[in-house]
Amino acid sequence: MTRPAAAMALLAELTHRCPLQCPYCSNPLELERAAAELDTATWCRVFSEAAEMGVLQVHFSGGEPTARKDLRELVRHAADVGLYSNLITSAVLLDRDRIAALAAAGLNHVQISIQDSEAPGADRIGGYAGGHDKKLAVARLVREAGLPLTLNAVVHRQNLQNLEAMIALAVELDARRLEVAHVQYYGWALANRASMLPTRDQLEQATKVVQAARERLKGILTIDYVVPDYYAHKPKACMGGWGRQFLNVSPSGKVLPCHAAESIKDLRFDSVTERPLRDIWENSEAFRRFRGTDWMPEPCRSCDQRELDWGGCRCQALALAGNAALTDPACGLSPHHADLLALAERESASPPPAFRYRRIGATAAV
Ligand code: SF4
Ligand code: FES
């Protein structure tokens, strides 16, 4: 077998702890506890191994990565080994001193999530009183520290009416980039799909708003747009193809091809505590299972798109068609596609149920 090319980026899920409780979180329902988290030295070794195998970027993520007290050391080590670093954060645990320390340690970029355009809606969705105003204050401090800022607006049927205002907020905060991301339904978000999935009309309206803003804000703000798969005809090339560009390391050290891979129960995931990162990337069963095209069933196997979208998303195929080894139902050629559209129409037209907030230990209580 030929050796796979090196991964481009490592998503380091430093912790599953998080002060927010967003119902759209893509973390698994069974969150890993603090006692299981990798220590500082192990994370640093992982970053060294990643750089040696050709990885270019590290995204510090979670949960909330700033809940780790050693974040500055981790950032410094990533910089020392030549990795470009991005902090994906809710921002509510940051202040001026900590931002300055992270910048001095070599952090390259900050990405802050917002839940809505105004505090009442945003704090309700995030389950954190005072969170929205704190985020805006921290976003300004990030820019004052000279760090580039991306704002990440996760949109769904309970905040899409404020999309214009979220775009205006990104301009006001001097963000270089805005990611308007419709919720992707994995982990907690899948459990909350009925309260978040937009109607087709809402989706079309949002798409028009984004297209107009892209025109209007050329040279001022770049807007990335992630649409919900449920109304798509072509699937996304999830993760750029399984085991082709990205790897995730969970808080306890499990190496995953994507953030939701643990939903595929018949896969076994190796840990950085037991095997070198490169060996896991190249040879582990979990990465080899859906890498390339050999695993594909029809209609993917004979489709001319198979090396462009890589059959879509394995986790979505499992969630919606019951089998991770099938064509993603987001594809119009999937035999499950019509069922998916019917489900989207039905759920989005029903009154939204109450949110199921993301909390460590909440699974059993709901
Ligand atoms: Fe992609 Fe498979 Fe659909 Fe072809 S059949 S477009 S390869 S998901
Ligand atoms: Fe797992 Fe798409 S989220 S392959």
Image (tube, rainbow, N blue to C red):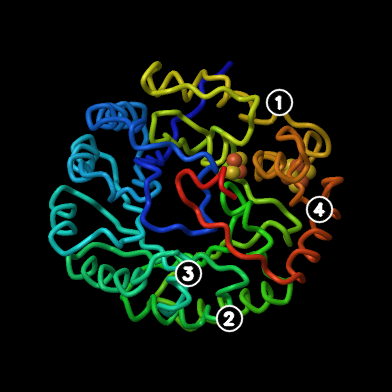
Query: Of 53 and 74, which appears nearest the observer?
Result: 74
Q: Is residue 61 left or right of residue 72?
A: right
Residue carrying label 4 = 332
- Disc 4 residue crowd, few under 14, some 14–19, many 20+, Cα 10 Å: some
Query: Of 340 and 335, which appears nearest the observer?
Result: 340
Residue carrying label 1 = 294
- Between the residue at mark 1 and the residue at mark 2, the CA separation in whole angstroms equals 44 Å
Residue carrying label 2 = 161
| Residue type indicated by callout 2 | Gln
- The correct choice, above or below, for 79 with respect to 254 in the image is below
| Residue type indicated by callout 1 | Asp
Task: Please tell me whether mark 4 or mark 1 is closer to you in this view.
Answer: 4
Mark 4 vs ligand 1: CB below 8 Å:
yes
Task: Please tell me whether mark 3 or mark 2 is closer to you in this view.
Answer: 2
Task: Please tell me whether mark 2 or mark 4 is closer to you in this view.
Answer: 2
Of helix, strand and loop, which one carries label 2?
helix
Of helix, strand and loop, which one carries label 4?
loop
**Mark 1 or mark 4, which is nearer the start of the sequence?**
1
Of helix, strand and loop, which one carries label 3?
strand
Residue 304 appears anywhere in the view: no
**Mark 1 or mark 3, which is nearer the start of the sequence?**
3
Mark 3 vs ligand 2: CB below 8 Å:
no
Mark 2 vs ligand 2: CB below 8 Å:
no
- Between the residue at mark 3 and the residue at mark 4, the CA separation in whole angstroms equals 27 Å
- Between the residue at mark 2 and the residue at mark 4, the CA separation in whole angstroms equals 28 Å
